[in-house]
Amino acid sequence: MLSEPPLWELRGHIMRTFNILVATFVASVALTANAADITQSGFSPLYTGVDFETATVPSNPTAAGAATTSKAYITRIDLKAPGIAFMATPHSGTLQTTSETISQFAVDQKVRIAINANFFSPCCNAAAEPKNVIGLLVSRGVVVSPPTTDPLQSEAVLAISRDNHALIDQAPNIHMNNVWTAIAGSAIIVKDGEDVSASSPSEGDPANPNPRTLAGLSANGRYLYLAVIDGRVVGYSTGTTNAQSAALMLAIGSYNALNLDGGGSTEMVRADKIGVPYIVNNPSGGAERYDAAAFGVYALPLF
């Protein structure tokens, strides 16, 4: 029979276990942002039904790392405002779409605001080329890319009807007969007002800070939020995990939100003069990427 360990060994084991638990808790706190810790500039009107603000998100790269922050750029769209409409990249080329920069998309489609949307392949030559889009993409009622058929792969979708009723849900729950515009991403990170990012799939590197592109809806479904978070720029903006992204989306008013393609694709452009867009954020690659899918907002000028 084994003898019981002496009391001092038990005490040492208890202290080591306690220290491990504390370290784990500190690490989890350091890698998570609370909505209350996020600094917002406050929304200001850009166009009829479209407001803009910036935000700063605490985003430590590691539990032991020095405190860092990330810069976010956000538009809020009133889905009931006159003149509001949406556009996604249409089908072209020999595959599903032909890649272009977000600025080019804004010029082609004459939208006021545009962001990057779905993940895609192949990536990432700096030239127009045929692309396969990952997940559901619908443009003017036409399915450009169907939802995934893999039962093991999660697919989060923003779907909007022609009369601007919007929904964020998993692809199998989307009723396609009324969808006018749709884009898809890797994960729903906020659901029914709660952070659900812990269940994010591996696509998009959810546990590490990266540039992010996000979309969210308010609880009453009236407001659509589009956010881009810069990253990978030392001294300016680190990027966020999915949990930190969820905290931002909750802070700005989202009740449901999803993560779209990010990294070097993350971009938002704005066109105060139609056809003359400029880049709002700072793409991490130092230049615009040629993306397979974009999402744009039509809006009237302020009266």
Image: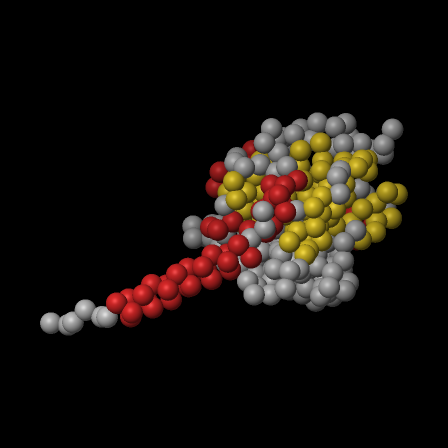
Q: 162 or 130: which is nearer to us?
A: 162
Q: 56 or 103: which is nearer to us?
A: 56
Q: Quadrant of the C terminus?
A: top right
Q: Quadrant of the N terminus?
A: bottom left
**Residue 233 on image: x %, y %:** 72, 64
Query: Is residue 3 at least partly visible in the picture?
Result: yes
Q: Total label count? A: 0
**Residue 227 on image: x %, y %:** 68, 46
**Residue 186 on image: x %, y %:** 55, 52
Q: 263 or 136: which is nearer to us?
A: 263
* Residue that appears at 67% across and 33% down: 223
* Residue that appears at 62% across and 43% down: 36
Above or below 277: residue 1: below
Q: Is residue 229 left or right of residue 145?
A: right
Above or below 186: residue 3: below
Q: 251 or 167: which is nearer to us?
A: 251
Residue 50 placement: quadrant:
top right
Q: Is residue 215 left or right of residue 297?
A: left
What scheme was used to colour the molecule? secondary structure
Name, please, the residue furthest toward the left.
1
* Residue that appears at 47% across and 62% down: 23
Query: Is residue 141 at least partly visible in the picture?
Result: no
* Residue that appears at 84% across and 49% down: 277
**Residue 238 on image: x %, y %:** 67, 60
